[in-house]
Amino acid sequence: MYKTAVLDNGIRVVHKFVESDVGHCGLIINAGTRDESVSQHGIAHLTEHMLFKGTKKRRAFHVLSRMEDVGGEIDAYTTKEETCITSSFLHEFYERAIELINDIIFNSTFPSKEIEKEKEVIIDEINSYKDSPAEMIFDDFEDLIYPKHSLGRNILGTKKSLKALDNKDIKSFISEKYNTDQMVFCSIGNIKFDKLLRYCNKYFGNNPANRRVYKRQEFSNRIVENKIVKFNTHQAHCVLGTYAYTFNDPKRLPLFLISNLLAGPGMNSRLNMALRERNGISYNIEANYSPYEDTGNFNIYFGADKENVEYGIELIFKELDLLKDKKLGPLQLSKAKKQLIGQIAIGSEIHSNILLSLGKSFLIYNQVETIKQTIDEIDTVTGEQIQKVANELFVRDKFSSLIYY
């Protein structure tokens, strides 16, 4: 069972008690790369890195050592719409983790010397990313379908944009975008909620309220774009995709089912069977649905020998057309639901997975579903709903494509 609270400054708290030696907690902030201006490209990710480079009372080494000295760990990530700091530790060190997360979020100093060093680290990250076309193509695809919009810009930034950023830019970004009413502290572990809440009030509660006043730029310029990029690789990489539902649209759940059915982690997915098992033209194929606040996209990726790309595309659209033309039968629908439910149940055994799930759910929906509620919701999806979603989205001339040849 989950328990929740709201601190006086607007920071929300959500906790699940579990009897475990290990605790997990984190702060999720509703601020990511889509909140950058053009001149700030890369600042959300750079800021996340710089949170570990020193506070008013700790040097960088002491920030990193604070949890590691007791066998714990602290980590962070940045996405298009969020920044997250998480920590895992033996449960007796809950207060230590909460104090440290508060310190690096609200008291970081962002030394100019460290900023310049970290820029070089991120530039190395950009260069290594360019050596992984199977990863880079997803960012380039979003750049293709979200033109001249912050959702399209990659998370890392560019060498040029990073060079222009400084201490004042980071502090300004935090002041404007790290709003207390857009923060959720999430926790799962062996600590009573009243005690956890005392720690949260002691540390997070002492920060002044900083409520959001700005609005994100909505995306509305839907286009269709097909692009081929010459790449000196042995294998071609291809992404086909179209716009999809926001994370508030009730049709998002049928689409998640479709995505899993087409090319989820199961080896028996429809596209894996069509491209790999029956035709042997692709080792790796996956379907992805990325919902955002005001838009979303569904895409399918596969890698293949260059002479097999067109054949692979035809096989994919053949499977998409089947979902449009033929409603899933009771047995097919039951299997699709059981597979997705099983994956959710297995994932829920990993407490660090639950941490991020409950935090993001509380951030977006201001409520958290239990695993049973999620399963019950999946069970309500009908074959008619899946067919309707397929017919709405899987229109071939509305698909964009990006191919690395």
Image (cartoon, helix red, strand yellow):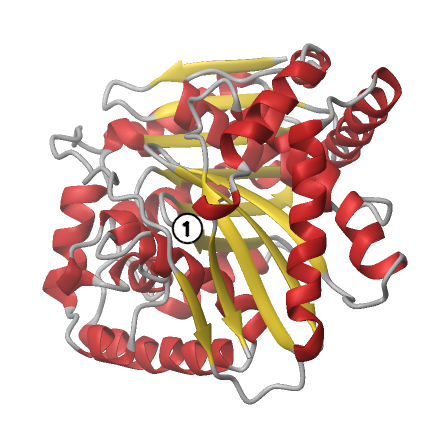
Quick one: quadrant of the N terminus? top right
At 49% from the left and 57% from the top, the residue drawn is 66
Image location (x, y in percent) of residue 389:
56, 26
Q: Is residue 396 left or right of residue 144?
A: right
Whether residue 85 is visible, yes or no, is no
At 41% from the left and 30% from the top, the residue drawn is 246
Whether residue 175 is visible, yes or no, is yes
Categorize mark 1 by other alpha carbons within 10 Å: few (<14), some (14-19), many (20+). some
Q: Is residue 116 left or right of residue 312?
A: left
Q: Amino acid at mark 1?
A: Thr
Q: Nearer the viewer, residue 37 or 141?
A: 141
Image location (x, y in percent) of residue 83:
38, 47
Image location (x, y in percent) of residue 85:
44, 47
Quick one: quadrant of the C terminus? bottom right
Q: Nearer the viewer, residue 246 or 403?
A: 403
Residue 83, relative to residue 358: is it above or below?
A: below
Instruction: Residue under label 1, please give it.
Output: 79
Quarter where residue 159 is shown = bottom left
Q: Is residue 268 left or right of residue 196?
A: right
Residue 132, relative to residue 167: is it above or below?
A: below
